[in-house]
Amino acid sequence: MKNNYHRFIDLPFDIPKPQRFETPARQFISYLGLDVVPDAMHKWVESHGLKVSNVVEGFYSGPFGSGVTVPIHTDQTDYPGVADRCKINVTWGPQDSVTRWYKLRKGVEATKIEHAKNYVNDGFEEAGIVPDIHCPHCWTANKNDLKPVFEKVISGPSLLNIGQLHSVFNPSKDQMRWTISFAILKDGKPLLFADALKIFDSCLTK
């Protein structure tokens, strides 16, 4: 099956783990500012004619049974699969936690999630960030209505297709799983996964 979901990428700089990732979280998503983006990352991204968006997120999946995990979702307003947008993610945690991608079964439709108060754009603004990506809603679906299509242990910096429905599974009983997620812009719009594969081709490892 064609891998249209994930690639490891060899970044020529380190991305330090944010201090807040040392403690558990009460919800799966956090809103981070550009101060967590290394200067070297800005320069490297800009050298490819791109820009790091100020939509920088932290995703938390607690130990198995903790009740906090990354649910099935997309990271965009477009219907799943319409526009396969891309993010650069770095994950810390157990080496057997996975990101999973899904396709809707025939005849089934995704469910729109309207972003309520204290969520996504509102959450960024409350954190003092005015997002440069407008995202008033995203999409989800019932797991029984989905077909799993790809699964990967994210053990290094990665390009992820966030336009398809995806989720996280952390089987560890005592380790937290944290991810820092960077949206990348091309001509002011979110970078597509197919374009990212071309632009970063020389940096992709497997």
Image: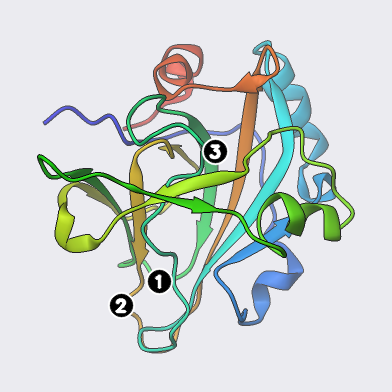
x, y (%) of residue 130? 84, 43
x, y (%) of residue 16? 70, 55
Q: Which residue is mark 3?
A: 88
At 89% from the left and 54% from the top, the residue drawn is 128
Mark 1 surroundings: few (<14), some (14-19) or many (≥20) residues within 10 A? many
Viewer-side label of 1, 3: 3
Which mark, by number, is residue 94?
1
Q: Nearer the viewer, residue 148 or 160?
A: 148
Q: Which residue is mark 2?
A: 171
At 40% from the left and 27% from the top, the residue drawn is 84
At 45% from the left and 16% from the top, the residue drawn is 202
Residue 194 placement, left or right of 22: left
x, y (%) of residue 166? 34, 50
Q: Distance from label 2 to label 1 (Cα)?
A: 8 Å
Q: Amino acid at mark 3?
A: Ile
* Label 2 close to label 1 by CB (< 8 Å): yes
Q: Amino acid at mark 1?
A: Pro
Q: Nearer the viewer, residue 156 or 21?
A: 21
Using the image, determine if residue 112 lies above or below residue 60: above
Quadrant in the picture for residue 164: top left
Q: Secondary structure at mark 1?
A: loop
Q: Earlier in the sequence, mark 1 or mark 3?
A: 3
Viewer-side label of 2, 1: 2
Q: Amino acid at mark 2?
A: Pro
